[in-house]
Image (cartoon, helix red, strand yellow):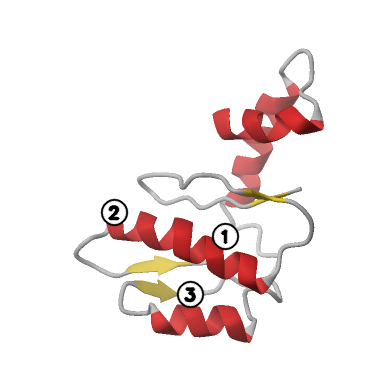
Amino acid sequence: MTIWVAISWYSAAPVPTLNGQITARNYVDILGSQVHPMVQMLFPNSAAVFKDDSSPIHKSRTVQSWLEEHEDVLKHSPWPAQSLDLNIIEPLLSVSDSWVRSRFPSPSLKQLEDVLHVE
């Protein structure tokens, strides 16, 4: 299971989970269904800056084309790969992990998606 998370200073996007390996097409779908609406809602009068890491999927031609088509409302600025000092997601995932692990009894794999959405 792959969990995708988007956060801003003001809000967090819904947390989609994907089964199997994520593809560039999956990522473009998430950008269109999660990130773009979130940016339009939170920043209606200005362009937001979207940051992602240097995953090969993020650099794919499909994703880069989508980002170019939407650059009027979503500026793109990639993070350096493996740059934990700039990556807020890792500390947040650590907190979420603690919350999930503190549940008793531990959630099953089938329940995990629901628990992650709650947490």
Disc nearest the viewer among 2 and 3: 2
Residue position marked by numbered label 2 in the rendering: 41
Residue position marked by numbered label 1 in the rendering: 86
At x 46%, y 59%, the residue is 33
Element class at badge 3:
loop
Residue position marked by numbered label 3 in the rendering: 77
- Image x and y of residue 22, in percent: 72, 63
Q: Specify whether 78 is left or right of 36.
A: right
Identity of the amino acid at label 1? Leu
Which of these two is toward me, 91 or 62? Answer: 62
Which of these two is toward me, 76 or 34? Answer: 34
Element class at badge 1:
loop
At x 59%, y 50%, the residue is 89
Element class at badge 2:
helix
**Residue contact between numbered discs 1 and 3, judged by CB atoms under 8 Å:** no
Identity of the amino acid at label 3? Ser
Q: Is residue 14 above or below residue 72?
A: above
Instruction: Find residue 32 and name its label.
Output: none
At x 59%, y 82%, the residue is 62
Q: Specify whether 86 is left or right of 10.
A: right
First of labels 2, 3 by sequence position: 2
Identity of the amino acid at label 2? Met
* Neighbourhood count class around disc 3 (C-alpha, 10 Å): few under 14, some 14–19, many 20 upward: few
First of labels 1, 3 by sequence position: 3
CA distance separating discs 2 and 3: 20 Å
Give the quadrant of residue 28.
Answer: bottom right
**Residue contact between numbered discs 1 and 2, judged by CB atoms under 8 Å:** no
CA distance separating discs 1 and 2: 25 Å
* Neighbourhood count class around disc 2 (C-alpha, 10 Å): few under 14, some 14–19, many 20 upward: few
**Residue contact between numbered discs 2 and 3, judged by CB atoms under 8 Å:** no
Q: Specify whether 52 is left or right of 17.
A: left
